[in-house]
Amino acid sequence: MEKNCSLPIYHKIALDIANKIHLREIQEGSLLRGRSSLAGTYNVSPETIRRAMKVLEDLEVVSSVKGKGILVLSAEKALSFLNKNQNITNISSYKSNLQKLLISKSKLENEIIDNINKIIDYSSRLSNINPLIPFEFEITKECKFIGLTAAETKFWQHTSATIVGIKRNGELILSPGPYIEFRESDILMVVGDTSIHHSVPAFLYDLSDEYENN
């Protein structure tokens, strides 16, 4: 079983300060506030701050300058210290990465929606030209398969049509699979050869005799 490792509070403070130096929130050549002030910021004793500074001094990240305070020496060595402690949660870095991921996710979702809308628009204008463009069939209350799935009705076997999407309540469900139920007001988007113009409504509404007579 993996053991829970808890670092001393002074080591965590040293990591936090090193991270701020690495992110340039604290600049090289600047002086850190006094121990008492840092103790108030981190809500710890001045002795805890002294021990945190000692960790950073030993790594040459900072240096104590008599009469002046704690001088920040090296962002590069601060990064080296952080890299040796990769198992420690770096809140600032995670927040930055999360923000970038959320922006990327939003852009990707917008691109997906835009492409779906273009496909639907293209489909509605050219559905009679290309057999790979979906035809649309609405499920009305007269449909005998409401509440059943495509698999249960053997939709493909009876119609030779493949369901590639369903418009439902203003949303588009792409590749719904064989186990999605037919619901009233659904609009099925299906592909197949020109025969599906007759086979789909004939199957859904028992119109086979009517088509045969025509």
Image: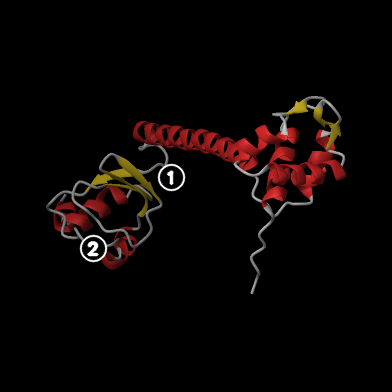
Instruction: Pick whichever, 124 or 148, lies toward us.
Output: 148
Q: Residue at x 71, y 38 (%)?
A: 17
In the image, is residue 73 above or below residue 188? above
- Residue 208, given in percent of the width and then of the height, sits at 18, 57
In this rendering, the answer to whether 197 lies above or below 73 is below
Task: Classify residue 161 as left or right of residue 207.
Answer: right
- Cα–Cα span, label 1 and label 2: 26 Å
State the SS at label 2. Answer: loop
Is residue 15 among the parts visible in the rendering? no
Q: Quadrant of residue 60?
A: top right
Q: Which residue is mark 2?
A: 148
Judging depth in this view, the residue of 171 and 189 nearest the camera is 171
Which residue position holds label 1? 132
Task: Please state the horizontal and vertical placement of residue 86, each as a whole percent of the image.
Answer: 72, 51
In the rendered image, the quadrant that contains the N terminus is bottom right
Q: Is residue 48 left or right of residue 63?
A: left
Residue closest to the eye, 97 or 158: 97
Residue type at the position of mark 1: Leu
Kindly tell me whether residue 107 is visible in this rendering: yes
Q: Is residue 148 left or right of residue 156?
A: left
Q: Residue at x 42, y 40 (%)?
A: 130
Q: Tell me the residue at 66%/44% (across/down).
A: 45
Q: Whole-percent x and y of residue 126? A: 38, 33
Mark 1: which secondary structure? loop
